[in-house]
Image (cartoon, rainbow, N blue to C red):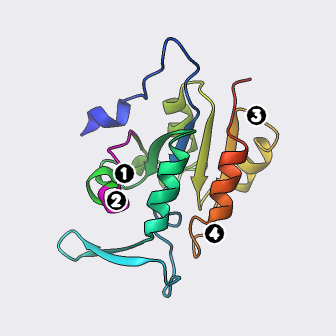
Amino acid sequence: MADHAERRPPASATSTPKPLLYLDIDGVLNPVCPHPDSGYRRHLLFRSEVEVLLSPAHGVWLRELAEVYELAWASTWEAWANRCIAPLLGLPELPWVACGSSAGAPDGDFVPIVQHAAGRPFAWVDDLIPPRLLRRYAHRSDVLLLPVEPGQGLRRGHVDRLLSRPPTAV
């Protein structure tokens, strides 16, 4: 499965590639809360050992975002995101960034994301974006860091923000 971790989205030779959109799962698509909104459905994975809460609206929103962005997973789920989460949201297999080894690091998933983006503009949606990074990149046109409240997960307002201001090359 390591080959997927290093897979880069293809860049078209005739047009500017879309910006990348890196998505966390836990706290973003799978809210961390005991009583989610009624729009969430419970799914038991790994022989009922893991429960995730997913909203069908997220699948619709992510397909909408895919018209503007190239989607990629940036989650400790790594390759499992394609096997477990993508089908439940009606998404195709997506590239993913190896984030599991960065857990607990000061910049968490950010370093592997920057390495994977390889200079391309990107947005990152996560519930654990360090405030220091939010301040540092607040005025950059090529990077959009979008924190999500882990108890609420991704909301339509987040999607609208991503659609209204996709990152652009400097």
Q: Which residues are magenta?
A: 87-95
| Magenta segment includes 88 | yes
Q: Position of residue 128 (x, y in %)?
A: 60, 59
* Residue 91 circle label: 1
Magenta segment main secondary structure: loop
Estimate the spatial distance between the alpha carbons at disc 1 and disc 3, rounded to whole Å. 28 Å
* Label 2 vs 4, first from the N-terminus: 2
Residue linked to disc 4: 149
The secondary structure type at the circle numbered 4 is: loop
The secondary structure type at the circle numbered 1 is: loop
Residue linked to disc 2: 85
Estimate the spatial distance between the alpha carbons at disc 1 and disc 2, rounded to whole Å. 8 Å
Q: Residue furthest top?
A: 13
Q: Amino acid at mark 1?
A: Leu
Locate the N terminus and report the quarter of the image it occupies. top left
Estimate the spatial distance between the alpha carbons at disc 2 and disc 4, rounded to whole Å. 20 Å
CB-based contact (under 8 Å), mark 3 and mark 4 = no
CB-based contact (under 8 Å), mark 1 and mark 4 = no
Q: Amino acid at mark 4?
A: Glu
* Label 3 vs 2, first from the N-terminus: 2
- Is residue 7 placed above or below 82 in the rendered structure? above
Residue linked to disc 3: 141
Position of 91 with respect to 68 (left or right) is left
